[in-house]
Amino acid sequence: MKILVCYPMKSLVKTYMPASSEALVAESPEDFQRLVHIYQPDSAVVFSEMFTTPAWVWLPAVRSSLSKQVPLIIVPLYRDESIIKQVIEELMLEGIYLLSAQLSQEEIRSRIGTILGFIGESSGYTEGEREGLVYSLMSYGAAGITTFCINYPILLAKQYPDKSIVVLDMNRTKPDLTRFFKLHHNQLALFRPDFLDIHTAANRKWRSVCKQSKHRPNLYYAHAASLWKSWEITNLIAAFRKQFDYVYIDWGYCFPETEAMQRLLYTADRNLLFVRADPFSIESSREWIRSWREKGVQCEVLLSHLDQGQPYRIGEDIALYGVVPRISESRLIESQRSNSILVEEFFPPKVYISSLKEIAKAEYGVRKAVSS
């Protein structure tokens, strides 16, 4: 692979590049343009500190100088990162991987290696023709999605170690899952160019991008909050469906109903609306589910925060996915403060764990039915 790097000091370039790679170095923007024309590189790495003109001037020029299929990796300065991201989005520039300005030298080298395929992406599993089930998780807010995503996948992974599971935090408003599992360096948005087409998306081993759970080797997490286009959602789901048995997508708030959210609802195998067990929330959920049913989308209710002995009535025409009981606020706060996972605690809340096990038992029945 011919790699062209634009960096002011040729002698230091190797410290940023994967050990097995070979790169041609341009020590000025003018030299970069000249070498692009002469050598037609297979990929390019550009450091924003090389340019004195604004990002909306130099970035489109650099992108247009390269062939459409050539990936462009940008290593930004702190002052440049946000404006470069804005330019990419507003000008809809394709094939650009924007690294974080917070990365260390070693982390930059690792990211470049992963993007360009120099770092082994062995998954530890034998890949077959997998058709995983995709679940979208939505709510009006404060209905327990994060607590569910922290605890339930671990329990499911423990019960069924032969199944691979991934949890994607797409909640742009409150990425609590990302904060809890520290997923800031496991961002799918970095790989947005891969989702331009399904073949590119499917070729990457996504386990190497995600963070593997320290509790279960068959469970993975990733930060996926971004302003996704609807077609990116389609290709993302198709790629993850091929590499995982279960894909849980924490979308968060179901308003506003963006194009990307609508595509997710139409593409997922099961759409779960998390609803607090109070009359107002239940009534609102009925209206929301019925409105989507008219559009051909089926949604189910996961009823949360149910007090012991509390009656509830969802409605005969509304599918109930499961019920989870209320956990005391003090217990949740302490769990978040200590970064403790309820299902892994020595004395877990028994009623809550039992409800999750019932859901897992029903899920495995669905999985067997789909596989047969």
Image (spheres, rainbow, N blue to C red):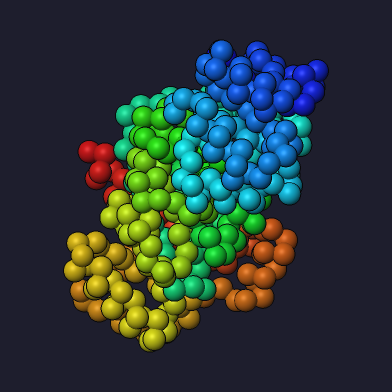
**Front-most of residues 351 and 47:** 47
Q: Position of residue 60 (x, y in %)?
A: 54, 38
Placement of 302 over or under 65, stated as above or below: below
**Is 334 on the left-hand or right-hand side of 89?**
right
At x 57% / y 60%, what residue is drawn?
175
Q: Position of residue 220 (x, y in %)?
A: 53, 42
At x 38% / y 56%, what residue is drawn?
260
**Is 49 on the left-hand or right-hand side of 369?**
right
Q: Position of residue 46 (x, y in %)?
A: 65, 30
At x 60% / y 54%, what residue is drawn?
178
Is residue 245 shown to the viewer in this render?
no
Is residue 300 shown to the viewer in this render?
yes
**Is 27 on the left-hand or right-hand side of 57?**
right
At x 47% / y 64%, what residue is drawn?
252
Looking at the figure, which quarter contains the C terminus?
top left
Placement of 31 over or under 256, stated as above or below: above
**Front-most of residues 284 and 337:** 284
Looking at the figure, which quarter contains the N terminus?
top right
Q: Which picture quadrant has residue 73?
A: top right
Q: Position of residue 48 (x, y in %)?
A: 69, 37
Placement of 69 over or under 362, stated as above or below: above
How many numbered marks, from 0 up? 0
